[in-house]
Image: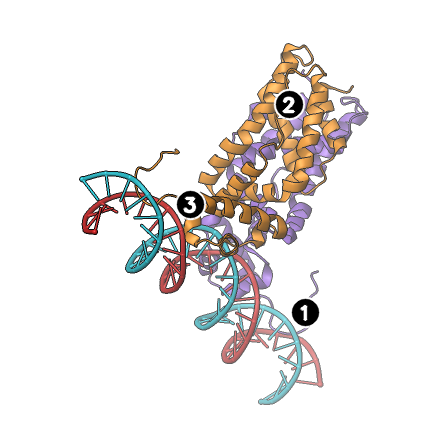
Chain colours: A orange, B purple, C red, D cyan
DNA sequence: TAATTTAATGGACCAAAGTCCACTAACGCT
DNA sequence: AGCGTTAGTGGACTTTGGTCCATTAAATTA
């Protein structure tokens, strides 16, 4: 992946930084659809082809920029936290929803892009979706070992249901608030 | 809406039929993204502008074509059916999933289009999403009046969760089968 | 220093969605 | 028949994502 080339002109690392920054800024300001590749490369001060040397599509670049910027985005809940898993789930979701206030529109655009480009869909799943699903699956498994959730339940399945719940709201532009986080937790763990 | 014009050249109704048919056929055969407007109008034998006189975008046309063709698509479950609502929900979902085998790809494309075009998103919600959500909400309310589901639960919320569950699978191209329909019903009504 | 290799640049090019427009066709009305 | 009105046609045009390519720049190696 990161094989160091033995000769030839070195890659300009700054160009990558500038492109990611420009992409993120423009997309946040104007919305994904309204930002052209031409505008991004102009803002970054590099040639169009330089962008395409590093990323395959606009969606690739923006996904990369979002992931790089939001390392902390929805950090996995700590499994050694002694509080009830129901509470941890609720807090985790509330956290995710907060980040979606900033990144929701970009994310909707990337989800759309994934539907139109099978190659990007795979990257998006590998780098974004699956890791986040794993976090909730792990939390649910922890709840099971703690006896807070019946062992008969399918943790992976429930993780998918939880994600589906807020994806659906996100894609249909309905609000994602703490109340909804609570409602999801209640559906999973039962009425309190 | 359907104001009859008092004068002027009459609209060629056949052109609309031909356009819908051509769009649906080409999209099913080649996939939404790979079908150009040029190909559709050529297939239908009309001018490009004739299409745009009737629909605003490619997504509009295809939504219209899908809705027209699949009137029967996911017919609402009969609320007077004496079987348990759990069973009705499961059957309804299995039915939806069957139709998604045919229309799933087109639907994914329309969902993507809705993320890129606010005007289309509204039409899509009004004509497709909300009516289908209502069906499940009604079914859940029926379950509540029958005492098969606790009255304390929020039917609209659960309807959203159910839809989210299979949307998520659809958009992430994971299988939608009878087993999944059963799993959703179990999450809603509790383990049998 | 010269040869080789890889990156960056700028601009031409292509396909596709959607707009615009001048022109023609088909209707009702007088 | 002539007029106004609306629909349909074909083609030019704009914008944008993405490709291609010839040329130039920056590095290593011999």
Q: Position of residue A155 (x, y in %)?
A: 60, 19
Tell me the residue that label 1 is attached to.
B5
Distance, label 1 to label 2, CA atoms, is 63 Å
Towards the viewer: A39 or D29: D29
Q: Secondary structure at mark 3?
A: loop
Q: Chain of mark 3?
A: A
Q: Which mark is residue B125?
A: none
Left or right for B144, reference A77: right
Distance, label 3 to label 2, CA atoms, is 37 Å
Tell me the residue that label 3 is attached to.
A12
Q: Secondary structure at mark 2?
A: loop
Distance, label 3 to label 1, CA atoms, is 64 Å
Q: Position of residue A48 (x, y in %)?
A: 44, 54
Towards the viewer: B54 or B17: B54
Tell me the residue that label 2 is attached to.
A77
The residue positioned 66% from the left and 38% from the top of the image is A100
Tell whether label 2 touches label 3 (CB within 8 Å): no
Question: How many labels sit on residues?
Answer: 3
């Amino acid at each position: 992946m990161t094989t160091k080339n033995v000769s030839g002109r070195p890659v300009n690392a700054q160009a990558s930084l500038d492109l990611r920054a420009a992409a993120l800024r423009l997309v946040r300001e104007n919305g994904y659809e309204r930002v052209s590749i031409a505008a991004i490369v102009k803002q970054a001060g590099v040639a169009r082809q330089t962008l395409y040397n590093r990323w395959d599509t606009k969606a690739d670049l923006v996904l990369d920029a979002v992931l790089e910027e939001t390392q902390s985005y929805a950090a996995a809940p700590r499994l050694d936290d002694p509080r009830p898993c129901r509470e941890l789930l609720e807090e985790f979701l509330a956290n995710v929803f907060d980040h979606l206030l900033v990144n929701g529109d970009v994310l909707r655009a990337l989800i759309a892009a994934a539907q139109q480009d099978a190659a990007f869909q795979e990257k998006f799943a590998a780098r974004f979706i699956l890791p986040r699903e794993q976090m909730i699956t792990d939390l649910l498994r922890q709840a099971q070992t703690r006896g807070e959730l019946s062992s008969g339940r399918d943790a992976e399945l429930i993780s998918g249901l939880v994600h589906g719940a807020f994806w659906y709201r996100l894609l249909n532009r309905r609000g994602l608030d703490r109340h909804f986080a609570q409602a999801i937790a209640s559906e999973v763990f039962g009425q309190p």
